[in-house]
Amino acid sequence: METADLSAFSLVLVRDGEIVHRGRERGIKPLIDCLEGYDASRGRVVVWDRVVGLAAARLMVYAGFVAAVRARVASVPARDFLARHGLDLRAEEIVEAILTPDGKNVCPGEIIALETEDPLAFIREIKTRWAGYCDVPLPDKADQDFEGCRGQCGYTPWCRACKESRGLGYL
């Protein structure tokens, strides 16, 4: 599949030339939903997204099963982050930053991604900000050991042990 129809959908996941997921909603919600629900054992995917900011790029990299990214618009920080992690990005337009729909401010997800270096802290902050967008519960205590859960944490598919148990690397 050379292209995905982003006029009807905001997000499309393609595996081996077949569409395996579609999302229609705006913002980062469709990406969070599909990354939470996709079975990584099914194989790597190409993500087609209307807008890819740094928050989306980080989520794609941390998920571990994204092979490449295609977008209408991507931010410079997203482009650079994807390149550092070996993901091919092809975008129709590269912009300095992803803006809110009114064009007056930088997107909150972009700000969170720029200000939060630690992957786990970033994921926690995104999930806290958009808690209604994912079914994975947040921890009650920040000091819980997510790195040693051996795939049983139930909080995130991105912890080190969870990814290693699925044969995926961790940053």
Image (cartoon, helix red, strand yellow):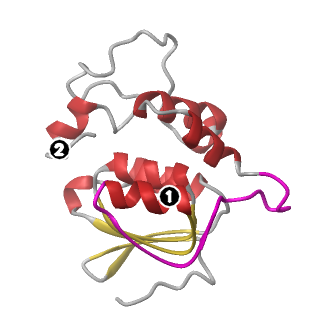
* Residue at x 24% of width, y 40% of height: 170
* Residue at x 48% of width, y 18% of height: 139
Return the x and y of residue 153 as percentages of the image width and height. Answer: 32, 24
Q: Does the magenta stretch include residue 104?
A: yes
Q: Looking at numbered disc 2 in the image, what kind of residue is underneath it?
A: Arg
Question: Which secondary structure, mark 2?
Answer: loop
* Quadrant for the C terminus in the image: top left
Q: Nearer the viewer, residue 92 or 19?
A: 92
Between discs 2 and 1, the one toward the N terminus: 1
Q: Which of 84 and 109 is in front in this view?
A: 84
Q: Up-down: is 10 above or below 92? A: above
Per the image, the residue denoted by label 1 is 78
Give the overall secondary structure of the magenta segment: loop
Question: Which secondary structure, mark 1?
Answer: helix
**Range drawn in magenta:** 85-105
Q: Looking at numbered disc 1 in the image, what kind of residue is underneath it?
A: Ala
User: Which label is found at residue 166?
Assistant: 2
19 left or right, relative to 8:
left
Q: How many labels does the image show?
A: 2
Return the x and y of residue 20 as percentages of the image width and height. Answer: 37, 71
- Circle nearer the viewer, 2 or 1: 1
